[in-house]
Image (cartoon, rainbow, N blue to C red):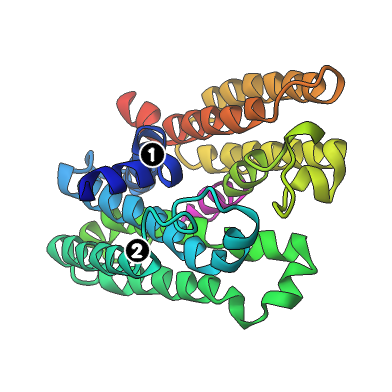
Amino acid sequence: MFFQRWHTYQKERFPLLAHGPLIAAFSACAVAFSSMLRDAPPPGWAAYFTAFTVCLLMFLQLRIADEFKDAEEDARWRPYRPVPRGLVTLSSLRVVFILAAVIQAGVSLWLDERLLIVLGIAWSYLALMSVEFFCRDWLKKRPVIYLVSHMGIMPLVDFFGTACEWLPGAGQAPAGLGWFLAASFFNGVVIEIGRKLRQPADEEEGVETYSRLWGRRGGAMVWLVALASTLGCAVMAARAISFVPPIGIGLGVLLAAAVVIVIRYLSKGTSGKWIENFSALWTLALYLLLGLVPLAFR
């Protein structure tokens, strides 16, 4: 019964089969990109393992933090979710959060004790996010600032992934990480907006979506701008590893496909799930093309 409850929780709130491959690509790309920037030998398995473990658990912690942050709203508007319906409790989630932190600290210490400093920076930002930077009401009234402030965690997690390679190998971050981290930030925006675009019939009372906030057209346009911004930053990052054409062509084709999806979403009533699923495909392509694919050609 105990294991069944947690299996159900992860299926509903943190599906490993969906998130696992994306986070694996995300973390592996960070390690590989750092090694290519340094023109270093291919990274060993320990760097990939540490980056994946910490990143996976960091995104789990983000989900758990949301459970606490949104507990009151979930109880009122979304009683079908695991916490309000009693499947799991906030106290048990707190224990999982702490265990995740212990594992993160353990694998970081195992690879290089200096990683604890980088991990501490990401933890600190996560803690500020959990309390809405001590200005919840102010942020809620300014959705753009809210979005930008919460997406700041993405480059920090990605920075930790790169540190798993450069910190043990060189002791300092290589030049050229900026555009890579910017691409990670905008890709976080792609995912966040992509999962909150819906048709009017799919909107839920009390659930804040960007299609309700900005309208379907406005939300879809912002999503396309985020895709284009990610592409631009990815191309600039690819310049540092001499891999611009594959990035430009690969993501360019996907961007064209995204435009088609948006047209169908706006004109033919295609479900917002198409946009959400495409955001996942885009993310997978981005990190494969910036990390493992160019590394394989070296």
Can residue 205 be seen from the camera position used here? yes
Name the foreground residue: 253 vs 154.
154
Residue drawn at (86%, 20%) of the image = 267
Q: Residue furthest bottom?
A: 134
Query: Disc 1, disc 2: CB below 8 Å?
Result: no
Asked which quadrant contains residue 172, the reply is bottom left
* Span shown in magenta: 175-186
Can residue 199 be seen from the camera position used here? no
Q: Amino acid at mark 2?
A: Leu
Q: Is residue 126 above or below residue 177?
A: below
Q: Is residue 260 left or right of residue 291?
A: right
Asked which quadrant contains residue 42, the reply is top left
The local crowd at label 1, few if under 14, some if 14 to 19, many if 20 or more residues have their Cα within 10 Å, is: few
Asked which quadrant contains residue 255, the reply is top right
Where residue 238 appears, x then y in whole percent? Answer: 52, 37
Task: Residue 114: say if magenta.
Answer: no
The chief SS type of the magenta part is: helix
The local crowd at label 2, few if under 14, some if 14 to 19, many if 20 or more residues have their Cα within 10 Å, is: some
Q: Amino acid at mark 1?
A: Lys
In which quadrant will I find the C terminus? top left
Q: Which residue is mark 1?
A: 11
| Secondary structure type for disc 1 | helix
Residue drawn at (34%, 63%) of the image = 93
Q: Which residue is mark 2?
A: 93
Where residue 152 appears, x then y in whole percent? Answer: 57, 62
Instruction: State how many labels appear.
Output: 2
Which is more N-terminal, label 2 or label 1? 1
Residue drawn at (72%, 53%) of the image = 208
Name the foreground residue: 157 vs 275.
275
Where residue 199 appears, x then y in whole percent? Answer: 77, 32
